């Protein structure tokens, strides 16, 4: 399915920067749609898409590396404004005839920046700001027509520009919070240099999406997999607004849901929103196929295949359906690896890589351009209840990826009940809405404990609580000790068979949020 058309857009050429998604978010926050594209996208494709501007992201390479990531040099002849960030500045310098050299001193972290020209990129900014540096190479001599427009003690050309070409570069990272007035620098590029009008918002996204969904679907019918999480719930409401009763939602209970979730899903969508909803209890079927499977990728593939199988069967039972709708989000697409992108594949996402190649449906993914916080704003605009809007993300394969090793009824019970306690205690303490995800993990490890006057050999449960903005990076949450203590006490007292509770203190990277 072609992407939703968003009007004016900024294309961000991704050179493998850890901050690439932050650039995209800052542009969107300014009211302009932004999309990450592979660094080697052709100039012809860029010209076809007619973006308002290009941003060249940072990256881990040197322009002189044998395998350096280099963009199509023809991008500089398109007449499209360009902003290079860090490695992006070095690319502009290198490809347009300047010289990049290893700096006498590397710059990492905060640095005072002196602004020398405030006509465009730094319009209405103070003379001095603090910026965030992360580079070893730097521009030594500039291409013809360029001049330095800001400097630091170690970088005479910490920002460069050519007003005639509308091409600019900054050696620092305006997208990170550590750079003072970073958002204003990006906004100056958007509105002063690119002449963007703004107007990208979740309200306009809904209007555009509803119109395009109607055009795409026409007189055909859509089958929507409803898990009850904010993503699939938002897809269901968006589709219902667009095509009404041409939509049928199917809630497949694969036996891997959170505690009490199935009942809430049926009540909310069938009774409150009056959406056609079919409730399928396929738990035995899923658990049978997962029996003895330990490899997490195999679990994801099995669950993805079984979902499609069940959807296909239900579709044949209830009518002629041509579309399958999913709640795939932008980070899912990126993490499952885009063709030509230097980003490494992290893991297969159920909504992207878990699907079989041969399907009897066309795929409808109306949220695939959005980040999670944008989806939550869409959900609120569509009237989704707060308890679903604010619910923590939940993986498509459910508790199967929070159970290390094979999925068994015993481990499933422990994981489900312990996770319920974690969420309940965080809600009591007012922390739940301040963190990204909170859950329990269990596996085959056992530890000795003392229950009453007897020694007992029981399950080890790991509690995972993280803070994040879009799940691309995450930091473990420093919970107050009394909260950790209460969670531990409740799990060992209320979940039979658990003797130890541990707390995960790994951030992403190097870890992932989910254990598998």
Image (cartoon, grey):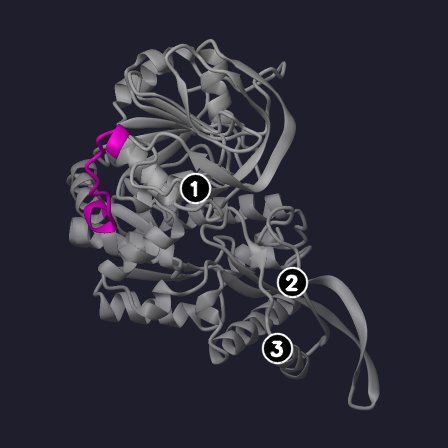
Mark 3 or mark 2: whose residue is earlier in sequence: 2
Q: Does 433 sit above or below residue 165?
A: below
SS state under label 1: strand
Q: In this view, does 291 lie to the left or right of 41?
A: right
Mark 1 or mark 3: whose residue is earlier in sequence: 1
Residue highlighted by disc 3: 487
Q: Residue 225: in sight, yes or no? A: no
Magenta region, residue range: 192-205
Q: Residue at x 21, y 40 (%)?
A: 198
SS state under label 2: loop
Label at residue 128: 1
Horizontal and vertical percent position of residue 358: 43, 33
Horizontal and vertical percent position of residue 89: 47, 24
Question: Whole-Å distance between the Cαs marked 1 and 3?
Answer: 48 Å
Q: Does 482 sit above or below residue 516?
A: below
Please tell me how crowded label 3 is: few (under 14), some (14-19), or many (20+) other residues with Cα within 10 Å: many
Question: Whole-Å distance between the Cαs marked 2 and 1?
Answer: 61 Å
Residue highlighted by disc 2: 408
Residue placed most toward the observer, 304 or 166: 166
Question: Whole-Å distance between the Cαs marked 3 and 2?
Answer: 24 Å
């Amino acid at each position: 399915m072609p992407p939703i058309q968003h009007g004016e857009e900024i294309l961000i050429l991704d050179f493998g920067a850890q901050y690439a998604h932050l650039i995209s978010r800052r542009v969107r926050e300014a009211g302009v749609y932004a999309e990450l594209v592979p660094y080697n996208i052709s100039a012809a494709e860029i010209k076809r898409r007619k973006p308002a501007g290009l941003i060249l992201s940072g990256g881990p390479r040197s322009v002189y590396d044998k395998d350096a990531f280099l963009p199509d040099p023809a991008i500089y002849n398109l007449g499209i404004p360009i902003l290079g960030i860090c490695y992006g500045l070095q690319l502009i310098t290198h490809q347009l005839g300047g010289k990049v050299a290893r700096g006498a001193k590397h710059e990492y972290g905060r640095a005072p920046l002196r602004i020398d020209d405030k006509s465009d990129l730094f319009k209405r900014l103070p003379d001095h700001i603090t910026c965030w540096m992360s580079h070893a190479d730097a521009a030594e001599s500039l291409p013809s027509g360029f001049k330095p427009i800001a400097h630091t003690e170690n970088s005479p050309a910490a920002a460069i520009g050519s007003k005639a070409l509308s091409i600019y570069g900054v050696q620092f990272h305006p997208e990170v919070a550590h750079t003072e007035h970073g958002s204003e620098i990006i906004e100056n590029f958007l509105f002063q240099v690119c002449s963007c009008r703004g107007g990208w918002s979740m309200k306009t996204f809904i209007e555009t999406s509803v119109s395009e969904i109607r055009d795409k679907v026409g007189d055909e019918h859509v089958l929507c997999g409803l898990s009850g999480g904010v993503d699939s719930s938002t897809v269901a409401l968006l589709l219902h607004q667009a095509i009404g009763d041409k939509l049928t939602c199917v809630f497949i209970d694969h036996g891997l849901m959170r505690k009490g979730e199935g009942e809430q899903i049926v009540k909310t969508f069938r009774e409150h929103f009056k959406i056609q909803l079919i409730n399928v209890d396929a738990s035995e079927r899923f658990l049978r196929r997962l029996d003895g499977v330990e490899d997490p990728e195999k679990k994801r593939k099995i669950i993805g295949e079984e979902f499609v199988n069940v959807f296909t069967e239900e579709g044949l039972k209830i009518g002629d359906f041509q579309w399958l709708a999913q709640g795939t989000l932008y980070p899912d697409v990126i993490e499952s690896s885009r063709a030509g992108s230097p980003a490494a594949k992290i893991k297969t996402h159920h909504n992207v890589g878990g699907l079989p190649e041969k399907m009897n449906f066309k795929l409808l993914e109306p949220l695939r351009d959005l980040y999670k916080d944008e989806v939550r704003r869409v959900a609120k605009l569509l009237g989704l209840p707060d308890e679903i809007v604010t619910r923590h993300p939940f993986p498509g394969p459910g508790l199967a990826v929070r159970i290390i090793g094979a999925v068994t009824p015993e481990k499933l019970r422990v994981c489900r009940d312990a996770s319920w306690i974690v969420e309940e205690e965080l809600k009591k303490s007012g922390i739940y809405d301040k963190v990204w995800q909170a859950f329990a993990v269990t596996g085959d490890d056992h530890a000795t404990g003392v229950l009453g006057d007897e020694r007992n050999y029981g399950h080890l449960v790991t509690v995972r609580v993280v803070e994040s903005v879009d799940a691309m990076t995450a930091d473990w949450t420093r919970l107050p000790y009394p909260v950790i203590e209460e969670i531990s006490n409740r799990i060992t007292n209320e979940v039979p068979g658990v003797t130890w509770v541990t707390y995960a203190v790994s951030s992403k990277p190097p870890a992932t949020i989910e254990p598998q």
